[in-house]
Image: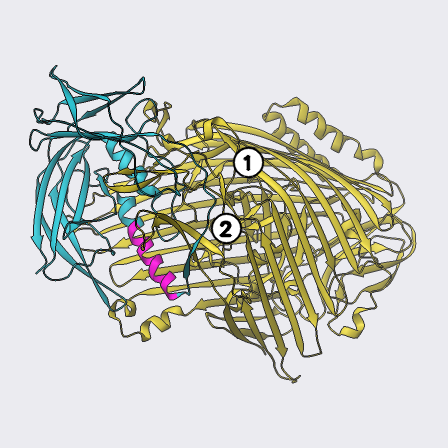
Chain colours: A cyan, B yellow
Amino acid sequence: MKSKIYHQQIFCTLLVFAMLLLSCKKVINIDFKDAGSLLVIEGSVTNQGNTQTVKLSKSVAVTDPNNFPAVSGATVTIASSDGKTYKLLEQTAGTYITNTLKGQPTKTYQLTVVTGNKTYTAISTMPNPVKLDSIGLNLVSVLNKDYIYPEVYYQDPAGIANYYHFTLAVNNVKSNNIFVYNDDLTDGRKVSHQLRDNDLELVSGKLISIEMQCIDKNIYNYWNGLDQNQNRGGASTTPANPPSNISNGALGNFSAYTVQQSFFVVP
Amino acid sequence: MMIMNKFYLLYLKRVSSFANYKYLFVCSIILGGFSNLQAQNKFTVSGTIKDAQTGETLIGATIKLQEVVISGVTSNSYGFYSLSAGKGNYHLLISYTGYQSVSKNVNLNQNLKLNIQLSPGTNLNEVTITGRAKKDEALSSPQMGLQAFSIKEIKDVPVLLGERDVLKTIQLLPGIKSAGEGNSGFYVRGGAADQNLILLDEATVYNASHLLGFFSTFNSDAIKDVNLYKGNMPAQYGGRLASVVDIKMNDGNQKEYTAEGGIGLIASRLKVEGPIVKDRGSFMISGRRTYADVFLKASSDTTLKQSSLYFYDLNAKANYRLDDKNTVYLSAYLGKDALGLGNTFNLNWGNQTGTLRLNHLFSSRLFSNTTLIYSNYNYEITNSTNNQDFKVTSKINDYEFKEDFQYFLNDKHQIRFGLDAVHHTIAPGNITSSETSSINSKTLEERYGAEISAYISDEWRATDRLNIVYGLRVNAFSLLGSGTFSTYNADGSIASSAVFSSGKLVKTYINPEPRASASYRLDSVSSVKASYSRNTQNLHLLSNSTSSLPTDLWIMSSNNIKPEIADQESLGYYRNLKDNRYEFSTEVYYKSMQNQIDYKNAAELRANENVESQLLFGTGRAYGVEFFLKKKEGIFTGWLGYTLSRTERKFDGINDGNYFPAKQDRTHDISAVGIYKLSKRWTLSGTFVYSTGNAITFPSGKYTINGETTFYYSERNGYRMPAYHRLDLSATLEGKPHPKYHSSWTFGLYNAYDHHNAYVIEFKDNPNDPSRTEAEQTALFGIIPSVTWNFKF
């Protein structure tokens, strides 16, 4: 987590340095290989409402358009550690839902997907929620330009491992950045994080929406893996598929998490 | 012989403590045979070779007796030589690149001491006369994979932003590849960047880069000589798999006080040197500082105004000849980088080294060098953002003792033996924060290690055609307490933990490293060579990022991490052409590597006390052929290098356990360097490099997660970056001769045809058609002009 903070800073500094140099960009052609069509499972159980969704789709070649084929006709169930099993029904192509499951913290959920004669399973435990105390705005001035970043505040509970995932949207445009944190170095502290995305211009009147998700360790590893693939000023790690909690080689993840939302308008 | 025997016994004690009888046997052969080899009526001529103008000792000068076909030695790192022959009258020939050769009559009827001064042969017209001494040391020396040059030889090679840089110049040699655009990091024969041992006056330099790698820590003003061994290290070197870069600082002018320096676009330099006592001792102090931050200060932007972006280097050295037999040397290096953004974030890092040496001549044939070394690398990060304040410090430091002997036994055997003991301390990270910070204070346990190596080697002129060097280095490494030491299961969980008290041995590894090489003269202009060597490495740099960062962590061998081992075999053919004006060589090599390190997906390497649980261990192999053609004399000089090579790694858990190309696997690598003396005042030079692009991991599919296009990777390093090529030009104008001072201008053009080499390639949605993915490359440097003004008083 600290590594993330200082990484961000290092690369931010690097970026300034790179801007001082004469860096230049251009689009090039790459002869991509095609790994074929793989199953992607995106499932969640939250403590908000009774509707839980699992989406099934397929991967495509890099050169294809971003139309990811839905996978229909699968059998999708979620079993709760209290012994109940919920069958999800296909509402639209590839989207399976149940309207009778409200996730509860500390319970463990098992997802089972049967499609194309293969069975895929995943387990996730919903952690206890940590209260999102407040959100604020932070002004950073770089190269005569002001950047406004939303900042989140919460009190990390001492003595237990916590994992957090935040999503950010401005005027309903979602940030591409991944905001994921653990408490390795912030255990028991009053914690704040800036959610930085320079692609989203925060100007007066824009609506910021932030969702705080308390996630389990596997899901932290998943988001953290995805995040490490992101290029940061030319110093990414060798990209790799994030460690998924789904068996049998399916891509994606299944996460049981708690949800808190907060909205405000840039003054 | 008395002393010899004493050290022999001492050595045997050492070796037998390692209880390895096989190697004991080899050592016995090496030393045992010599007592009979002492011919009765042989005499020795010995002394020191120096520059006549500055009194600077000359390393690697060739000394031979004209009348004896197979005689010939090179001066050692302190300019010392020793030659033995039967009674008689001889011509002693001394030659050194860039200097006028000297011939002296010697009447060898007793042991002679003969110090020799060579004058720089700077005048073009004089270069053609090189005396009778053939500069063919490269042919007859069994040493392979060695690139040796003095700073003088590379001063005209064009460089980025006018900063001469030895680490960038060596990247123009075959078998050595740049770590990236403008980067002073390098890869040797398929090795990783941390597998190079970089020594500055014998002290290990742990991070040899400034400004995130764009410049090296070696200010060329302060440097005399560079030797680079591509894996076939002599036995006195050890500790890294791929190479040793042995850099020696200038000793300082023994005759007069001089000052020289330069003013460039990015940095200025100043060096002062002079005698402490004339012809007896001298000092040298050299400094360099960049001033990009001066421009930042001039900016109207407040953040930039408060930002820092600079580095400096300070080199200092002094030597003093106590008497004919003893000389002391003290050298020190201090370098620092500061990178700061506004007053919120600062990253500083730097190396400090210190070396105290005593050269002692036991006799005209036994030369010893006793060295005490300190080396430290540290970084500090300070973040003062509200609620997020923290400070991280980390360091690695070494205390080292070396005792090295060179024994010029007779005209057939030159023995080198010694001992090297190092104590390592690594403080992986110490985090401090205020009460209101988001971040807890945390201190990762310091790690301690002791590394003791003993070595012996014999350079043996077996026949007038065959030269052999064979030897053995034995390395014992111990990880020491105190601390908690864990072992890990495959899933990264702790399998066992044990607490050790201070100084207790946690884990010990003993590795014998046999080394041998031989050269065979085919005729007066050509030779073949063969060599084998084993190297081991107990310090490993953890870096899972595509570019190196000053915060990358050094870690020692442990219960989980075994010493890295490399075995390299090589064969070479050397030939001098056109009356020795051209030098051609080709070498093939095969290297296998054990206990290599890679990282699990989503590894957390920082501030992680269980960082060893994040590692994967595997093997590697590297093989290739290198061609090198060098023109050494005339108004046009330069070289042409070509390498065809492959380097691969194999890890359980990556690429289904199959071999995959390492990042630095570049099939073709070409470099050309040309220096043309247009007139007495103008020198033109150019370099051209071409290499296959790095092996890299690109996506082979895409899918959607959370509404975001996400990429799927099917194999490690299955793609290639576009090929890299670049032309650099430079022109130097020497000022009109003046009795009091000398000045020159150097004009440079980096990337002269403005080729945009890919630095990174990113994949993103096409802005005009968001449903399509496009690949966008970022180039770091386009064409960059530079100008530097140099002066000397």
The local crowd at label 1, few if under 14, some if 14 to 19, many if 20 or more residues have their Cα within 10 Å, is: many
In terms of depth relative to the viewer, which is nearer, B109 or A81?
A: A81
Left or right: residue B314 compared with residue A139: right
- Indicate whether residue B399 is drawn in magenta: no
Identity, as a three-letter code, of the amino acid under mark 2: Val
In terms of depth relative to the viewer, which is nearer, B518 or B773?
A: B773
In this rendering, the label closer to the viewer, 1 or 2: 1
Say if mark 1 contacts mark 2, CB within 8 Å. Answer: no
Write down the residue under mark 1.
Answer: B648
Report the predominant secondary structure element of the magenta stretch: helix
Instruction: Please provide the residue range marked out in magenta.
Output: A8-20
Q: Mark 1 to mark 2: distance in Å?
A: 27 Å
Q: Residue at x 40, y 41 (%)?
A: B426
Q: Secondary structure at mark 1?
A: strand
The local crowd at label 2, few if under 14, some if 14 to 19, many if 20 or more residues have their Cα within 10 Å, is: many
Write down the residue under mark 2.
Answer: B205
Q: Secondary structure at mark 2?
A: loop
Identity, as a three-letter code, of the amino acid under mark 1: Glu
Chain under label 2? B
The quarter of the rendered structure image containing the C terminus of chain B is bottom right
Look at the picture and state if B575 lies above or below B595: below
**Horizontal and vertical percent for residue A65?**
34, 43
Q: Name which quarter of the figure residue A204 lies in.
A: bottom left
Look at the picture and state if A257 lies above or below B644: above
**Horizontal and vertical percent for residue B449?**
45, 36
The quarter of the rendered structure image containing the N terminus of chain B is top right
Chain under label 1? B
Q: Name which quarter of the figure residue B384 lies in.
A: bottom left
- Indicate whether residue A15 is drawn in magenta: yes
Q: Which mark is residue B474?
A: none
Q: Evaluate whether residue B562 shows in this view.
A: no
**Horizontal and vertical percent for residue B284?**
56, 66
